[in-house]
Image (tube, rainbow, N blue to C red):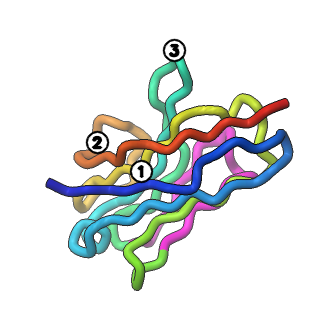
Amino acid sequence: QVELVESGGGLVQAGGSLRLSCVAPEETFSKSAMGWFRQAPGKEREFVAAFAAGGGNIYYADYVKARFTISRDTFKNTLYLQMNSLKPEDTAVYYCAADLWGPGSDMASSYEYWGQGTQVSVSS
């Protein structure tokens, strides 16, 4: 069983910033595409950003470009999502996911392992 542990969510005012973290087992982190997804109440889970396996290519959903930055620390086996200029519509549960040897897909069904999620709430 692969455990991904997210942290860093919270309540912030519109225009504010948060940084999410996701710690993964070393073997999973080094061999997997690592991504962030989010799910708002009543909506489907949607792609936010991802690294391809090996940390080469990076992909972003169009609606977060220039506001969110995905990064990784290979020494800490930790994935990050820096979120700036947050908007109320960014309110959702944010999930970390891993796809063994994956390309950094924007499809949730491609990812085998998921964290428990961390709540991000943005007030207007």
The local secondary structure at tag 3 comes to: loop
Badge 1, how many Cα within 10 Å: few under 14, some, many 20+? many
For disc 1, the marked residue is 96
Rendered-image quadrant of the C terminus: top right
Give the number of the disc on residue 110: 2
Residue at the spot of label 3: 42
Observer-nearest of 62 and 115: 115
Q: In the image, what residue type sits under mark 3?
A: Gly
Q: Work out whether residue 14 or residue 103 is closer to the camera in this orientation and state it.
A: 14
Q: Do the residues under discs 3 and 1 have CB atoms within 8 angstroms? A: no
Give the quarter of the image for residue 55: bottom left
Please tell me which residue lies in front, 103 or 37.
37
Question: Magenta residues, as a range?
Answer: 55-72
Residue 27: image quadrant is bottom left
Verify whether residue 64 appears in magenta. Answer: yes
Whether tag 1 and tag 2 are in contact, CB under 8 A, the answer is no
Residue at 51% from the left image edge and 61% from the top image edge: 21
Quadrant assignment for the N terminus: bottom left
Residue located farthest toward the bottom when viewing the structure as drawn: 75
